[in-house]
Image: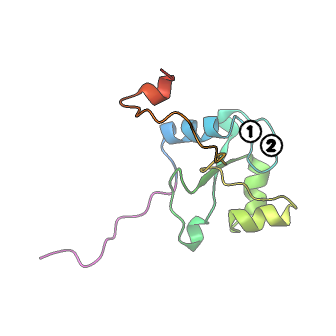
Amino acid sequence: MGLLFNNSPKRRTLKRTDKEILYLRAKRKCEACNKKICLTEMQVGHKMPYSKGGTTSLRNSICLCYRCNKLQGTQSWHAFMRKQGKKPISATSPRRSKKKSNNNKKISGYEWLFGK
């Protein structure tokens, strides 16, 4: 007989390594006010609030200072940034230029990472 309901609680916090990745991805700054923060004072915010069905994942997380995390409350990241008078920037997908490369060589293995 299979389980009818999945009663396991959803994870509400990131693992330590994920927090470190998020912190480095944000360049050691709050993503809302750009204040330099240390890892111990970093708060993990959600783009789509947990209370409104958002997941606790790196894709849905943002690095915030205590003040900005409290100001965001249960608002979405985009609504919060608009309220602050700022244009919301996607933290997970940086803007890439659409330059066409003249180099048509295939890159295999980890060469792309080390630039060989």
Disc 1 to disc 2, C-alpha distance: 5 Å
Query: At 70% from the left edge and 34% from the top edge, which residue is drawn?
Result: 28
Amino acid beneath label 1: Lys
**Residue that protrudes farthest toward the top in the picture:** 116
Mark closer to the chain start, 1 or 2: 1
Task: Please state the horizontal and vertical placement of residue 36, each as a whole percent of the image.
Answer: 78, 35
Image side of residue 59 versus residue 27, left or right: left
Query: At 74% from the left edge and 39% from the top edge, which residue is drawn?
Result: 29
The one of 87 and 97 positioned closer to us in this rendering: 97
> Magenta part of the protein: which range?
1-12
Residue holding disc 2: 34
**Residue that protrudes farthest toward the bottom in the picture:** 4
Amino acid beneath label 2: Asn
**SS class, disc 2:** loop
Query: At 24% from the left edge and 79% from the top edge, which residue is drawn?
Result: 4
Residue holding disc 1: 29
Task: Please state the horizontal and vertical placement of residue 13, each as a whole percent of the image.
Answer: 52, 51
